[in-house]
Image (cartoon, rainbow, N blue to C red):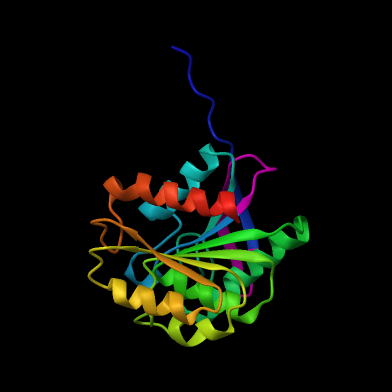
Amino acid sequence: MLALPLVPRERRTFTGPTGHLDARLEGPADGRRVLLLHPHPEAGGSMGSRLVYDLATGLADRGHRTIRFDFRGVGQSEGRYDDGIGETADATAVLEALHDEHDAPLVVVGHSFGGGVAVRLASERADDCTVILISTPLRVSGSSLSPIDDARRVMVPCHVLIGSDDPLVPVVDADRLADALPLGRGPDIIENGDHFLTPEHTPAVLEKVTKILDQA
């Protein structure tokens, strides 16, 4: 049996406001670029978090160029947790570096805390990008991030995905967030999915994200 070719992976360091940010890039260099933002650093979130990793590799397998990195103070990234403010600055630094290299539109995907960072990031910039929010609360506990308050300043398309059985973000909250975003779409519901969208839900999440990318 012939072995399937491995998806290209690159380890890279971006320069953030407080030091180096450890990152992984996967997929073909000319693929559509997708920046993935991980869950809460104070709850063990990292670029290696299962859904972030599965999306990075799954989208790369489908020809996209995925970029994920550890926020400050996580893994090998320098600095310390900064209440969502510094983490937004980290994401901004990575986004700007990617734009400097290739001025093509990006897709930003945030999971939970990462979704809060994505909304804050989009509220502060006028980039030609698309945002996908997965399991994103109205307000992110343990941080200054408040997607429901930032939403009105976001002028790019935002797609909201939520598990139907998420105990932390009820579907009604996801519906409120989608309505508050001027270009909000959804919520798109993952049936029987919880907050972390356990492995049996990965194929459904990957299909929904891929469909959004194909239409963006």
| 193 w.r.t. 207: above or below | below
Q: Nearer the viewer, residue 183 or 162?
A: 183
Q: Nearer the viewer, residue 54 or 173?
A: 173
Relative placement, left or right, of 46 versus 120 is: left
Q: In terms of image quadrants, where is residue 88?
A: bottom right
- x and y, in percent, of residue 35 in the image: 57, 58
Per the image, is 186 magenta?
no
In the image, residue 41 lies at what x, y percent?
40, 69
Total tally of numbered discs in the picture: 0
Residue at horizontal 22 percent and vertical 70 percent from the top: 167
User: Would you place residue 82 above or below residue 104 in this image?
Assistant: below
Residue 52 is situated, as x and y percent measured from the top left of the image, at 43, 54
Q: Residue at x 59, y 44 (%)?
A: 64
Left or right: residue 28 compared with residue 110: right
Q: Quadrant of residue 43?
A: bottom left
Q: Is residue 76 above or below residue 183?
A: above
- Residue at image coords 55%, 65%: 131
Tell me if residue 55 can be seen. Answer: yes
Q: Is residue 18 magenta?
A: yes
Decide: is 80 above or below 49: below
Instruction: Identify the residue at image location x=63%, y=81%.
Output: 124
Bounds of the magenta segment: 15-33
